[in-house]
Image (spheres, helix red, strand yellow):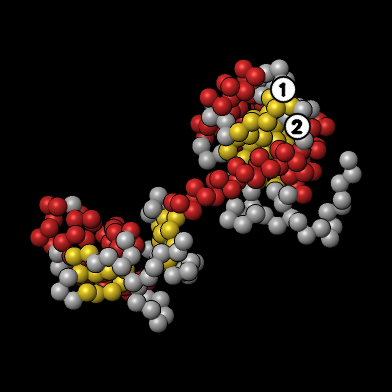
Amino acid sequence: MEIPARGGDLHHEPRENAGVTTVLVVEDERDIRDVLRRYLERAGLNVVTTGTGAEAIQLLTSADLNVVILDLGLPDIDGLEVLREARRLGGLRVLVLTARSQVDDRIVGLEAGADDYVTKPFSPREVVLRVQAIIDRTATAERDREHSFGTGRLRIDDERHEATLDGRLLELTPSEWGILSALTGHPGRVYSRYELVNRVRGYEFSGYERSIDSHVKNLRHKLHPEGSTIIETVTGVGYRFGWSRDD
Ligand code: CA
């Protein structure tokens, strides 16, 4: 099949939210490898290829990869070894390719942690669609972990304990992070100083409620978006987060 030349083709933009996604194709049959490369590149993905399991394992650690397309029937080592190594390293999605006669391999592959599989012979388009589905699922999982407020201005990453405002990473102390994390957990809800101290330090430090005020003051200083109050004081009660959460 003839593939259009890349010049002038506008369909190379990486998919939104996924950044630049790099796919490693591990396949010893050169024709399949080449056709997958062409289709994946046309879909806007970076592509790295290899025909051996040994080189694949090297690439898993040395290249900046997101997705691995893995043929289980490799000439040098069992493809499952590559799969296990990818799992051990973490952060990689794996689409397994198997021959129709290797149904048992397929089951073993899924049990070993493959994200999806495609049976040979396959259409390259099908493989690209599966890869894009994997990328979309990963992006959705990331979105669930990251919450944003004020139409994307403030972003909170609960797993990394990071907050960014207008694209700027905020350098927060553990106490400041604890307060911000609590308040953004329920925008609009008023938290007493007592509750915030508990969230930040645990119950045994409940005598230090007033220290919350200085932490909030420092936090406000670090946030200070123009013309907007992110952390509101509710007189006689405590504090609340003033921005609503984006959906
Ligand atoms: Ca093979």
Residue 116: x and y, percent?
Answer: 60, 33
Give the residue drawn at x 67%, y 35%. 69
Q: Quadrant of the N terminus?
A: top right
Give the residue drawn at x 29%, y 59%. 182
Residue 228 is left or right of residue 47, and the answer is left
Q: Determine whether the residue tagged by mark 1 lies in a helix, strand or loop.
A: strand
The residue that mark 1 highlights is 99
Camera-side residue: 41 or 126? Answer: 126
Residue 183: x and y, percent?
Answer: 30, 63
Residue 133 in view in this figure: yes
Give the residue drawn at x 44%, y 55%. 146
Q: In the drawing, what numbered circle is on residue 122?
A: 2
- Ligand 1 resides in the quarter of the picture at top right
Three-letter amino acid code of the residue under disc 1? Ala
Ligand 1 under 8 Å from disc 1 Cβ: yes
Give the answer, above or below, for where 17 lies relative to 141: below
Three-letter amino acid code of the residue under disc 2? Phe
Residue 109: x and y, percent?
Answer: 58, 24
Camera-side residue: 196 or 49? Answer: 196
Graded by Cα atoms within 10 Å as few (under 14), some (14 to 19) or many (20 or more), the crowding at tag 1 reads some
